[in-house]
């Protein structure tokens, strides 16, 4: 009787699963059409998400900081907000920390386009609350991860192939930037230039479609108001071009200082015990709170004050003070693990630096220079180009904000100067460096471009059993004596730590260290390795550099995950050297 009842209820209980399976099978037959329709849907949903981001952040901020509120709020609220978000990020939303752009690129290149719905929701609510409490980070970077996450969730739910799910990541990213900055053309360029790293990506049509849709949603709900109200500027005298070049130099060095300071602080926090991360964001909250108590303009992303600088109504001393305070407030807030981006802070720093230089220049040469607001505008582009390393996006974004062609030449001079100096003194771009600190090695353009090359994945083999880091040298020698490899991986509770050479074990044994644990012999920093998508010639070069005949193959998203090994004979055989030698 029970089994009969179950049989009767089974179709009723599974009707939704069956219907969804049939729908997915039908959609997979029309994958290209579905992809275009999804681009429209992702653009619309991302536009709604960004509008909600703006509204929630502003309204919550007004409640936390009502007009004429007491000074104690400027200290207590950032501390309480960062503490609450620290607990939430640690316990429930660990993938919602930080900017969102490095995480989006990691999802695209190292996680098969996977961004969970939990991460999307956590990113939205945690970032909105954090920014409303006065932490001086931006909403644009988190919006990118939210938009990309919407695409990832929808693509997986509809059963699209992994390649198509990955292709939806830059589509959602473009939609987010289009709505966040009200700059649809710059959004397309950013998605291709920074997220994809490929200006000739075949998904250009879908990226444009999503960007336009998201921008239309923003205009429909919030009106066609630019992010900043900017007066028209003109080039007063050719001498100004030299001053704009000096602004680019200053912007380049400030970009380097910002990047190195942020990465250095973040490295410090990452080296603290993992179980203490719930309170790390409080360091940012305390720093910002104390600064905000004395200088309220430090709180929040500060777009209102950017507008004042662009219109030339801000005092020189205040702009210089804000450059210094924001530099430290933003870097500490981000490095300590608060949720928020660096787009907005880079524009703020650029506006203050440019406004200060413009004020000095206009005071010394009033007949040869434009008003300080013009320099604040160019400074925004210079800092964006220097920090984010997207110079073309920066030029187009500022142009879309002003709709004034006269600013293009000064902007290009300052941007390229800043970009050159930043690249010269900080080799690794900030998003790539942040991903590297998280144990994610994003592939370079050359790695992604050579799709038809011989890759490590095609010849790598299963790794030998990993040696425990607690194993004694004597035991390790016994275990490896009959093995086929000279190099053996060492792990701690399943987490890959590094490699050991048989010769090193023999030397340690002869030196009387046979009772010593292997952990004391392993070098865990800069372990020679390759990734599965690397070209074979790169594996050969690294074998030559480190004098190894075996290299570990490490997962891009987790440097403690060993995927296999690649051996010198296998590499040579892939190039046909063995066959040639046998003739």
Image (cartoon, helix red, strand yellow):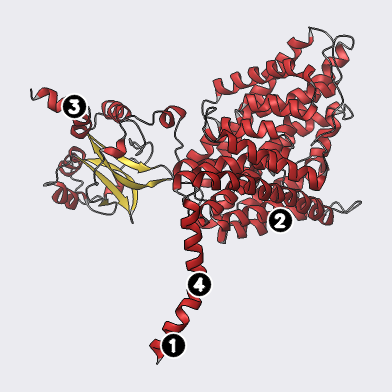
Determine the residue located farthest toward the top in the rendered image: 238
111 to the left or right of 59: left
Residue drawn at x 56%, y 53% as measured from the top left: 154
What is the spatial separation of the Cα atoms under label 2 and label 3, in whole angstroms? 61 Å
Residue contact between numbered discs 3 and 4, judged by CB atoms under 8 Å: no
Residue 425, percent across and down?
55, 22
Position in image of residue 384 (x %, y %): 67, 29
Q: Secondary structure at mark 3?
A: loop
> Going from the N terminus, do you reach mark 4 or mark 2 first?
4
Pick whichever of labels 1 and 3 is earlier in the sequence. 1
For residue 15, the mark is: 4
Res 103 seen here: no
Residue at the disc numbered 3: 576
CA gap between label 1 and label 4 equals 16 Å
Pointers 1 and 4 in contact (C-beta within 8 Å): no
Residue 445, visible in the rendered structure: yes
């Amino acid at each position: 009787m029970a089994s009969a009842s179950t049989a009767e209820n089974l179709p009723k209980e599974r009707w939704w699963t069956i219907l969804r399976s049939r729908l997915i099978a039908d959609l997979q037959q029309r994958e290209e059409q579905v992809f275009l329709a999804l681009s429209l849907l992702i653009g619309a949903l991302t536009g709604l998400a960004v509008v909600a981001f703006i509204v929630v952040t502003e309204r919550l901020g007004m409640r936390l900081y009502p007009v004429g509120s007491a000074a104690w709020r400027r200290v207590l609220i950032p501390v309480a907000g960062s503490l609450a978000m620290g607990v939430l990020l640690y316990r429930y939303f660990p993938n919602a920390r930080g900017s969102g752009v490095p995480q989006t690129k990691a999802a695209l290149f190292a996680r098969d386009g996977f961004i969970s719905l939990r991460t999307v929701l956590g990113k939205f609510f945690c970032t909105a609350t954090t920014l409303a409490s006065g932490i001086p980070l931006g909403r644009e970077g988190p919006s990118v991860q939210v938009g990309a996450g919407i695409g990832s969730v929808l693509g997986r739910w509809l059963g699209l192939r992994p390649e198509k799910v990955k292709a939806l990541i830059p589509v959602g990213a473009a939609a987010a930037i289009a709505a966040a900055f009200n700059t649809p053309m710059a959004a397309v360029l950013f998605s291709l230039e920074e997220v994809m790293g490929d200006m000739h990506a075949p998904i250009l049509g879908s990226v444009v479609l999503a960007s336009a849709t998201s921008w239309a949603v923003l205009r429909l709900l919030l009106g066609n108001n630019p992010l900043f109200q900017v007066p028209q500027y003109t080039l007063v005298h050719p001498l100004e071009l030299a001053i704009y070049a000096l602004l680019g130099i200053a912007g380049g060095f400030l970009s380097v200082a910002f990047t190195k300071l942020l990465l250095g602080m973040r490295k410090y926090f990452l080296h603290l015990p993992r179980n203490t991360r719930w309170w790390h964001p409080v360091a940012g909250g305390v720093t910002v709170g104390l600064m905000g108590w004395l200088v309220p303009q430090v709180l929040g992303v500060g777009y209102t004050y950017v507008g004042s600088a662009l219109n030339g109504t801000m005092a020189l001393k205040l702009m210089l003070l804000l450059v210094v305070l924001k530099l430290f407030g933003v870097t500490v807030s981000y490095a300590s693990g608060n949720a928020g981006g660096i787009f907005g802070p880079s524009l703020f720093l650029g506006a203050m630096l440019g406004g200060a230089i413009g004020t000095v220049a206009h005071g010394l040469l009033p007949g040869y220079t434009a008003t300080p607001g013009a320099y604040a505008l160019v400074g925004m582009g210079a800092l964006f180009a220097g920090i984010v390393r997207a110079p073309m996006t920066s030029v187009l974004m500022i142009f879309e904000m002003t709709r004034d062609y006269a600013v293009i030449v000064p902007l290009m001079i300052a941007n390229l100067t800043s970009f050159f100096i930043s690249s010269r003194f900080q080799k690794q771009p900030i998003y790539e460096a942040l991903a590297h600190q998280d144990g994610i090695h994003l592939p370079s353009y050359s790695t992604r471009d050579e799709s038809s090359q011989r890759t490590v994945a095609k010849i790598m083999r299963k790794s030998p059993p990993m040696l425990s880091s607690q194993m004694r040298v004597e035991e390790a020698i016994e275990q490896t004596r009959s093995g086929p490899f000279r190099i053996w991986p060492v792990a701690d509770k399943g987490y890959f730590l590094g490699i050991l050479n048989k010769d090193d074990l023999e030397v340690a044994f002869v030196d009387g260290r046979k009772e010593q644990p292997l952990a004391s012999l392993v070098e865990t920093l800069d372990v020679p390795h390759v990734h599965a998508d690397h070209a074979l010639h790169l594996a050969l070069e690294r074998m030559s550099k480190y004098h190894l005949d075996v290299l570990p193959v490490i997962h891009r998203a987790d440097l403690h995950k060993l995927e296999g090994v690649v051996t010198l004979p296998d590499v040579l055989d892939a190039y046909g050297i063995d066959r040639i030698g046998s003739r």
